[in-house]
Amino acid sequence: MNFISLARHADSTPSHIARVEDIDRPLSAFGITQTIAFSKKMYAKRVEPDILYVSPAQRSIHTGMILIRELQLSYDRIRVVKNLYNASEYELLDFYEHEVEQDKHCMIIGHNLGISNFASLLSGESYSYPTMGCVTLAQKIEANQDQENAKNTSRQLKKGFEQLFACLS
């Protein structure tokens, strides 16, 4: 069974205060606290991604690094992916279908609106992500469908996932 955790980065410093380009905005002090609190929830639910794909935005990278540290995972599990910066749900779907190591539990840390719409696209549920919001989905496998077929059929992705864990507050 494939698992995917879709997370929005933690709270960041507003651009008018940070006085930097959007991609360079750092996490706020609250965002750091949010990420640490979220990592404790992940740990309690035993949600441990094998690999984290993060947007190149400073706030996404920092969110991923804190999660890695707090979950006591190896830093080689994090991958910065240029195309995840402000990606739409369809760009995320393309990334998932073509770039993600399908046999692993991956986490994608990105931006709203794309990340919440992607979770909705996969599960058929409606999601609205706050900062440091996350949903972990498991791919549904029908009794007459083998694992290999589930990996290779794009149309099975739509509404082919069910929620296992959510932290949306």
Image (tube, grey):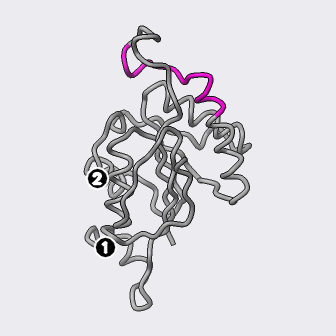
Circle 1 packing at 10 Å, graded few (<14), some (14-19), many (20+), is some
Please tell me which residue is depicted at 64% across the width and 57% down the height of the picture: 47
List the single residue furthest toward the bottom.
144
Circle 2 packing at 10 Å, graded few (<14), some (14-19), many (20+), is few
Disc ID at residue 94: 2
The spot of residue 98 in percent (x, y) is 33, 55
Predominant SS along the magenta part: helix
Disc ID at residue 156: 1
Q: Amino acid at mark 2?
A: Asp
The spot of residue 94 in percent (x, y) is 28, 52
Residue extent of the magenta highlight: 21-33
Decide which of 14, 137 is in the foreground and name it.
Answer: 14
Decide which of 132, 157 is in the foreground and name it.
Answer: 132
Quarter of the image holding residue 32? Answer: top right
Q: Amino acid at mark 1?
A: Gln
Was residue 24 drawn as part of the magenta stretch in this picture?
Answer: yes
Q: CA distance from mark 1 to mark 2?
A: 14 Å
The vertical placement of 97 against 65, above or below, is: below
The spot of residue 118 in percent (x, y) is 34, 53
**Horizontal relation, residue 34 to residue 17: left or right:** right
